[in-house]
Image: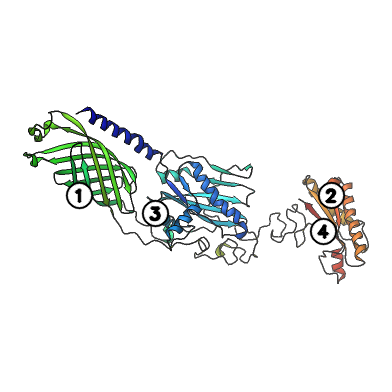
Amino acid sequence: MNRKKILFILAAVFFLSVFSIPAYCNEKPTCVVLMFFPDVDSTRMSETERFSAQYTEILGRLGLFEVMDYQTVARMIQEKNVADLKLPCTSKDCALNVGRLLNVDYAVYGVIGHIGKLYSLETTLVNIDRGTEAQYAVTDYEGTQQGFEATAPAENIKSLFGVNNIPQAKETMQSGTEQISGAAAPIAADTETAKAPTAEEVHPIKTEKNLFVTPRIGMGATDDSVEFGGGLEVQYKHLSCGLLIGADGYTGALSYYLKPNTSSPFLAFTGIYYDTENHGVDEIGRIYGLMLGYRLNINDHLNARLGLGAGYVNWDQTELNKNNTKDNDEEYIPVFEVSIGYSFGLGSKSSPPAPVTTASTYPMEMSKTDDDADGVYDADDACPKTPAGASVDAKGCPLDTDNDGVPNNIDQCPNTPTGAKVDARGCWVIPGIAFNTDQSTLNDENAKSILDAVIIVMNNLPDRRYEIQGYTDNVGSAMYNQELSEKRAFSVKNYLIKNGISSDRLTTKGFGLNNPVASNETEEGRASNRRVEIKPIF
């Protein structure tokens, strides 16, 4: 074997080793983000946009994917003009359809729900080729104030990718300048969110084809011979066996594809057999070799295969040597293959693609209903007629953060101190502190005992400041009642200061005959309006 041939083989092997294999090892799978929820609540547009954008960033920071954001995916779908495929995706079937259309490796779809002001986003990462999936949970508390957190369970990712080197650390995003710690756990089964059913619950699982038959035409060649022909390749998952038949011989290959059923590098053991009857002998010349190559999937069926390697032949073992065309010696020669094929998948017939739904109709198009639109299904709603706009707890009842008996949506005085008596508006009222007509002094012992209880509450909240508000009935002029209401407020303030409450924590304000809590047409109503209210200042 001459020096030129040796150099040619070494150069070919070096080229494939340096460029082909490392290029594959460094290649990151492509992941598309298919979730975006601008129409969940128009008042939370910025937060729903942020869900998609920040989750895209999290996937990018994990370093596992080349991430394609929602806007890019939507533009590509629009350019392909696929009428029955709509975004965002809220089901596995939709994610699989988009992933196959765009020829990517992974896709993320999501379902958004909320409990009152707590908005949560449950997302699922789908392996397009294998049809497997892993779930994540992303939660946003009260807009941007509490930050954004995401967690990726390591066991789910390992099962999805089949690898053990996936980062297990929690990825926490920043909101503004504040970093929020602690992981958001996956959404629990009993969480009252508008969660979509899984694809298995709605539609039959599509059978993934692993067996492919590919008729091929092409050529196999060595340094001094080219053989054109046609043949067949049969592939099951990563392994394939192929045969190319020509006029003077056969080229066979046992191949291993690094990525099945898609564009992929491969390693092959090859055999080239020459029918030497044309040379006056009846034996067959045999060449064995190893080949590195790449299969390019042009579309779902058409693909091209290119390979280059080195072959071994011992000319002593072939009667072709009788023609004295070769030395009686071993020799290594270059081998080459190029072919084009058309693949057919075999296996159970897939179910038809499931209809794709949009975020505005899914997941609410389920057997469960939510008549009061509070985010809790009627079957689980303990308060089925919640007023529109009211924040609710997990049972569907209006939230009452300060536990004063007045729901947040109508509470004009939030965060009232625990134990304080409030009116229908949720504002702290000193019970029994009533004033006689045209009076502003505290002479009633019962009133003073009530104020003593108020002092205990104030001492338990030493950093809280309060506004003392005085009111009157409608007897007399507005100017006179304004002055009288201010005196009543100051009288209460004076009592509190004398009993240890710092004056820095107290302010007074008179409202005169405004804001009555009862009708001034009766004596009882006028007595109720001659009052003092205390409101915390935030």
Q: Which residue is mark 4?
A: 431
Q: Nearer the viewer, mark 2 or mark 4?
A: 2
Residue type (three-letter) at the residue carrying disc 1 = Gly
Q: Earlier in the sequence, mark 2 or mark 1?
A: 1
Q: What x and y, as percent, mark residue 32?
A: 46, 50
Q: Nearer the viewer, mark 2 or mark 1?
A: 1
Provide the secondary structure element on which disc 2 rests.
Answer: strand
Q: Which residue is mark 3?
A: 100
Vertical placement of residue 183 versus 355, above or below = above
Q: Is residue 501 visible?
A: no
Vertical placement of residue 386 versus 333, above or below = below
Q: What x and y, as percent, mark residue 157?
A: 45, 45
* Count of all numbered marks drawn on residues in the image: 4
Check contact, mark 4 vs mark 1: CB within 8 A.
Answer: no
Q: CA distance from mark 2 to mark 1?
A: 96 Å
Name the foreground residue: 105 vs 125: 105
Q: CA distance from mark 3 to mark 1?
A: 30 Å
Q: Earlier in the sequence, mark 4 or mark 3?
A: 3
Q: Which residue is mark 1?
A: 230
